[in-house]
Image (spheres, rainbow, N blue to C red):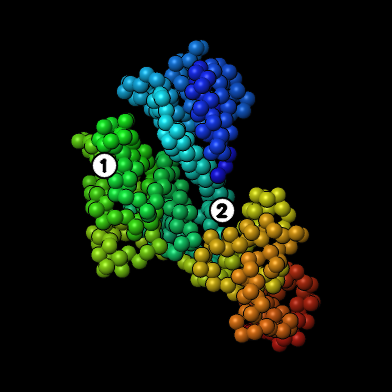
Amino acid sequence: MKMIRVAIIDDEETAGSMIKRILDKEGFEVETFLAGQPFLNRMRQNPFQLAFIDLNLPDIDGMEILRLLKQTDEETEAIIITGHASIESAIEATRQGAFHYLTKPSRRHDILLLANRAREKIALREENKKLKLAMGKDNLVAGFVGSSPAMQEVFAMVKKVAMVNCNVLLQAETGTGKQLVARAIHALSPRKDQPFVYFNCGGFTEELICSELFGHEKGSFTGASSTKIGLFESAAGGTVLLDEIGEMPLSMQIKLLHVLQEREVLRVGGTKPIELDIRIIAATNKDLKQAILKGSFRDDLFYRLNVVGLHLPRLTERRDDIPLLISHFIEKFNLAFNKEIKRISPHAMELLMSYNFPGNVRELENIIQRGVALAENDELKVVDLPASLRELAMRGFNGEGMPTLAEMEKHHITKVLKLTGYNKPQAAAILDIPRTTLWRRMRTYNLTDES
């Protein structure tokens, strides 16, 4: 995850140092300040993305620092810390734009939880910015790479559903881009300037899901030392992605159904319902209709979620996009690893074109990431691919023994010609050979436009 610059403004040096030690170990870049003015001066020189601000400082009141901070950079997240907590100060801090409110003495768990949540929010905001920027550059859905008919259908559906304020159910295999689709729908919708909140429903107890999604009132259970705003509330006006919805316990499904029907949420331990204005996008790699038959998923919840259903194709259903994806990932990891990979060898390309990709696009991304990291020159070769793929190459493309060099060449030229619609100049460019050489190879192998 991207490095986040954090400022801690606390006149109690011990308290500030304690928070710094905790965050340093988690990969944050931290600076501490004993007063407000030095922080504000530093902020103007080199902005911070997150600030822990003590309310009682020797030179400037913490609320005033929060106000000035938001004037300087409204996207900097602020967590107010104080040893004199009150409901009034918490409300005022939230009204001034604080991300959250932390009381002293602060527990390590609470500090890390809030810092990581703020980091996730910052990362999501950056992703949404990139998404919106790409939206303005072309007609495609930003973040997606693909020109295949299957992906063009997805692009068209995303744009349509984004403008309609309804629930969406994404059913697709792992690694096909469900989260990317959800974020694209949000970024293209009228809710684009409001929060996008992600929650994974898998592997959690009903109690934990309730606390995270609905929030809880102070004293509602042992350890509930303060009121907590749930994810549904925090997404006010925006979009909530419920990933792995098929893993949600049945008892929790009933509560979620109530939220969808009534558009309100009741905090754990609360008595007053809170109205919601959010869009729900649910995602799963399960067949929910089969889950309904087995009794592990409610049919009424399914129909509430599946107002619009979207299926994302497996990578094997859009093989024509593999060369485009490879090029995209090479560019991405060239930048990440400071490499200058310019091409992929024909043999490596052919091997990837013939692979089944059980992990879909995510697996292809991991393969190219590994290859770019290990490549020793400007070409990605078979030797740079995982051992399992190299073994596939040794067995031959059909698993029936080693092909001859001529068979491999004919096979690859045929694939490239089909991929380009028999556009000879384009095929020659992909093969990195002169057009005259391509013509000779086509005559040698008796390849025509009908091959």
Q: Which is more toward the observer, 93 or 227?
A: 227
Q: Which is more toward the observer, 76 or 238?
A: 76
User: In this rendering, is residue 45 above or below 391?
Assistant: above
Q: Position of residue 321 (x, y in %)?
A: 57, 66
Label 2, label 1: how many angstroms apart (C-alpha)?
39 Å
SS assignment at label 1: strand
Horizontal arrangement in the rendering, residue 370 relative to residue 434 (left or right): left
Q: At 45% from the left edge and 54% from the top edge, which residue is drawn?
A: 179
- Per the image, the residue denoted by label 2 is 138
Q: Which is more toward the observer, 170 or 141?
A: 170
Q: Position of residue 238 (x, y in %)?
A: 38, 43
Q: Residue furthest top?
A: 59
Q: At 29% from the left edge and 49% from the top edge, which residue is drawn?
A: 206
The quadrant in which residue 380 appears is bottom right
Q: Position of residue 79 (x, y in %)?
A: 45, 28
Residue type marked 1: Val
Quadrant housing the C terminus = bottom right
User: In this rendering, is residue 159 above or below 270?
Assistant: below
| Lower position in the chain sequence, tag 2 or tag 1 | 2
Visible residue check, residue 119: yes
- Per the image, the residue denoted by label 1 is 265
Residue type marked 2: Asp
Horizontal arrangement in the rendering, residue 215 relative to residue 17 (left or right): left
Q: At 59% from the left edge and 66% from the top edge, which residue is drawn?
A: 322
